[in-house]
């Protein structure tokens, strides 16, 4: 087996990163677009040549991009992995070439020695925060929940599902009655919500929607409006990301809660890379970003203004 950690440690010799390859998933959500923008801004501010590759949601495109970055001899590779499995071989290839890899926002199930560090939030905790919000909001009332899951096989879809279930475990009044992927997109959220509404008495039997990201919630809000119901009132809406548009929806009473995921994964990633390349400082294996809950009491228009220039 390859001693990737050892190979990495030997690399840290008074150097700095000049070129970094970034394999991005795509542009499925407002959050993803912001992460791309922030990564480009962070690279520019540090004088780093960022080679960007958009995988259009396909793991094979990401694998090809990483191989191409290895062939180009970049100093480091950032990857936002679309799904959690299937990365061992390509990560081993990067390690053999002694090119450090940093994961952004999503996790892989490979051996941690195959990457330098991962920057992201506690994805299970995000689901727990969302679930706890609902438990507190409905009190003891019966509540039938529909769930829009993220991309199947992605770490946020797996972990946000788990976290939400952890939070509602002790609440017998809350039940997840339908769950399907909307692929983290607005159109996916709308389409799947339409089928949930149809299957659940036109929506009359649904108390709340839990969406694994804001974009799917925003698509679902449209579907609920078109069905003649009142999103945020007839159906409570809780989701994750804290993109500007969810704050607009909140200010109009259409959404009830969101859990923030910062789009700035690259800042901590570049900091860790710089320290590592300067003198071999090994970062923590997981650099955790915050997960804060926002509700309509938190000045949604102010939050919207604060974010709208971030590239969302
Ligand atoms: O991996 C993070 C998730 O990916 C975001 O929550 C979602 O919007 C994006 O598509």
Image: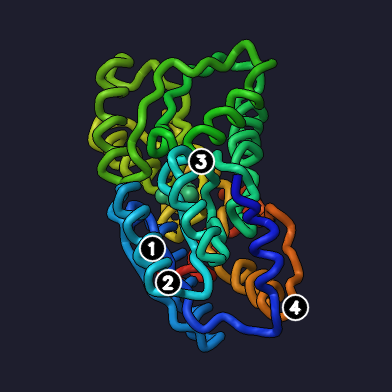
Q: Which residue is mark 2?
A: 37
Q: Real-space Cα distance between discs 1 and 3?
A: 17 Å
Vertically, is 115 above or below 71? Answer: above
Q: Of callouts 4 and 3, which one flags the residue occurring earlier in the amino acid sequence? A: 3
Vertically, is 217 above or below 141? Answer: below
Q: Of callouts 2 and 3, which one flags the residue occurring earlier in the amino acid sequence? A: 2
**Quarter-wise, where is residue 281 in the image?**
bottom right
Q: Secondary structure at mark 2?
A: helix
Vertically, is 196 above or below 263? Answer: above
Q: Secondary structure at mark 4?
A: helix
- Looking at the image, residue 122 sits to the left or right of residue 283; the answer is left
Seen from this angle, which residue lies furthest bottom? 47
Look at the numbered disc 4 and say if its residue's Cβ is closer than 8 Å to ligand 1: no
Q: Is residue 41 visible?
A: yes
Select label 4 or label 2 by which is in front.
4
Mark number displayed over residue 294: none
- Circles 4 and 3, Cβ within 8 Å, touching? The answer is no
Q: Which residue is mark 1?
A: 33
Q: Position of residue 70 (x, y in %)?
A: 42, 66
Seen from this angle, which residue lies furthest front? 1
Q: Which residue is mark 4?
A: 279
- At horizontal 35% and vertical 65% (from top left) the residue drawn is 68
Assign the C terminus to one quadrant of the image: bottom left
């Amino acid at each position: 087996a390859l001693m990737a950690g050892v190979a990495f440690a030997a690399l840290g010799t008074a150097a700095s990163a000049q070129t970094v390859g970034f394999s991005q998933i795509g542009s499925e959500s407002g959050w993803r677009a912001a992460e791309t923008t922030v990564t480009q801004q962070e690279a520019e501010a540090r004088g780093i040549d960022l080679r960007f590759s958009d995988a259009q949601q396909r793991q094979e495109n990401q694998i090809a991009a990483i191989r191409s970055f290895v062939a180009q001899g970049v100093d480091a590779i950032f990857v936002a992995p679309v799904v959690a499995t299937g990365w061992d071989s390509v990560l081993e290839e990067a390690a053999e070439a002694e090119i450090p890899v940093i994961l952004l926002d999503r996790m892989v199930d490979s051996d941690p020695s195959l990457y330098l560090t991962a920057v992201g939030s506690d994805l299970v905790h995000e689901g727990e925060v969302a679930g706890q919000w609902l438990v507190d909001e409905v009190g003891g009332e019966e509540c039938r929940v529909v769930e829009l899951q993220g991309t199947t096989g992605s770490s946020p879809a797996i972990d946000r599902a788990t976290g939400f279930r952890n939070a509602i475990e002790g609440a017998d009044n809350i039940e997840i009655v339908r769950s399907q992927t909307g692929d983290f997109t607005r159109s996916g959220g709308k389409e799947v919500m339409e089928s949930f509404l149809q299957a659940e008495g036109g929506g009359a039997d649904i108390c709340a929607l839990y969406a694994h990201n804001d974009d799917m919630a925003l698509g679902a809000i449209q579907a609920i409006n078109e069905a003649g119901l009142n999103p945020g009132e007839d159906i409570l809406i809780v989701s994750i990301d804290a993109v500007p548009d969810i704050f607009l929806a909140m200010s109009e009473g259409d959404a009830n809660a969101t859990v923030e995921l910062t789009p700035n994964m690259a800042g901590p990633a570049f900091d860790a890379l710089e320290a590592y390349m300067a003198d071999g400082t090994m970062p923590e294996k997981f650099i955790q970003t915050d997960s804060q809950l926002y509700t309509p009491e938190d000045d949604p228009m102010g939050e919207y203004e604060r974010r709208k220039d971030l590239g969302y």
